Image (cartoon, rainbow, N blue to C red):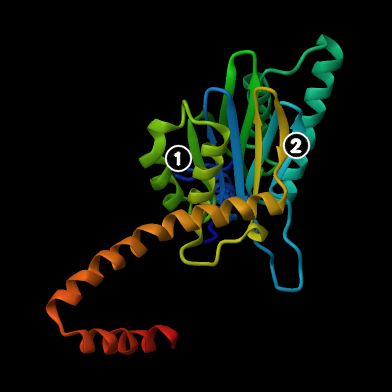
């Protein structure tokens, strides 16, 4: 996007009816590292990609615990995400102190959306440049919401935001029908496969992703790296099995079409390029 005379503050409308400051904030979400959320009837899984600015630095946290029954995953400006997660945590504490019960997820999301929308009405403010996937559990079941910098919010069965999120959305749309009755392990599996789609060929290890779960009888918690790595390894083995079976089936065909001596030489000839 290019700077123009209509983007000096958030209350200046362009002749086409656009608020460029809000569009810039939404663009910051698109360029942030990917975050993914999906839910079943009883559980919500949040996952995100951890990207460090350089090899000498650590990554910034992208998943935050709000309460025992609510957590958020962010994409965009991490500083804004920390501010909003702190606000959400404060609202949950105030509600619990006043009513002695847990804050419903939907009510918290509405309050968060109102806070974001105020920043599109005041010329001395700017929109929060962060998108939040809010996952939680209340009396009405499991919920997953997306809060936009413009103040809009939507409830989803599964959603992905951030850089290269379209590839993850395509995967989630293919598997969408199985999510509602899925177990927590199956949800985590789908979340990891969706994260892998966003990497586009990069090596997938537990060090570049974070996974969190909340559900019935399971307060919000982040899975440790070793657990995530074990899951990743088991899923990759499952993926590699079909090609191996095809190679075994192809071997008898070669034996019927060539002499035994030729069969002994063929694997050596084919093995050399693979080693290189």
Q: Residue at x 68, y 44 (%)?
A: 126
Q: CA distance from mark 2 to mark 1?
A: 38 Å
| Whole-percent x, y for residue 19 in the image | 53, 43
Secondary element type, mark 1: loop
Query: Label 1 near label 2: C-beta < 8 Å?
Result: no
Name the residue at the front extreme.
260
| Left or right position of 72 against 256 | right
The residue nearer to you, when weighing 263 against 150, is: 263
Q: Residue at x 71, y 73 (%)?
A: 55
Q: Is residue 257 above or below residue 164?
A: below
**Residue on which disc 2 sits:** 65
Residue 163 visible? The answer is yes
**Residue on which disc 1 sits:** 17
The residue nearer to you, when weighing 37 against 164, is: 37
Q: Is residue 87 above or below residue 55?
A: above
Name the residue at the top extreme.
99
Rendered image quadrant of residue 258: bottom left
The residue nearer to you, when weighing 132 against 230, is: 230
| Left or right position of 247 against 106 | left
| Whole-percent x, y for residue 197 in the image | 46, 55
């Amino acid at each position: 996007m290019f700077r123009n005379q209509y983007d000096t503050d958030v209350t200046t409308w362009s002749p086409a009816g656009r608020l460029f400051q809000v569009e810039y904030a939404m663009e910051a979400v698109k360029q942030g590292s990917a975050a993914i959320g999906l839910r079943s009837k009883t559980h919500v899984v949040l996952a995100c990609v951890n990207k460090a600015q350089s090899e000498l630095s650590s990554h910034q946290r992208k998943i935050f615990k709000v309460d025992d029954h609510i957590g958020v995953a962010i994409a965009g400006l991490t500083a804004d995400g920390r501010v909003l997660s702190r606000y959400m945590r404060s609202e949950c504490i105030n509600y619990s102190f006043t009513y002695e019960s847990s804050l419903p997820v939907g009510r918290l999301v509405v309050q968060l959306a109102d806070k974001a929308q105020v920043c599109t009405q005041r010329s001395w403010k700017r929109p929060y440049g962060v998108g939040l996937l809010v996952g939680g559990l209340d009396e009405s079941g499991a919920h997953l919401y997306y809060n936009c910098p413009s103040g809009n919010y939507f409830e989803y069965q599964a959603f992905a935001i951030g850089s290269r999120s379209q590839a993850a959305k395509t995967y989630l749309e293919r598997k969408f029908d199985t999510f509602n009755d899925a177990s927590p392990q199956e949800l985590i599996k789908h979340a990891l496969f969706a994260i892998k789609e966003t990497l586009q060929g990069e090596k997938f290890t537990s060090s570049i992703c974070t996974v969190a779960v909340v559900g019935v009888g399971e307060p919000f918690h982040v899975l440790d790296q070793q657990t995530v790595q074990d899951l990743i390894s088991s899923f990759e083995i499952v993926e590699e099995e079909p090609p191996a079976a095809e190679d075994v089936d192809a071997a008898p065909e070669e034996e019927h079409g060539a002499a035994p001596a030729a069969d002994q030489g063929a694997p050596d000839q084919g093995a050399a390029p693979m080693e290189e």
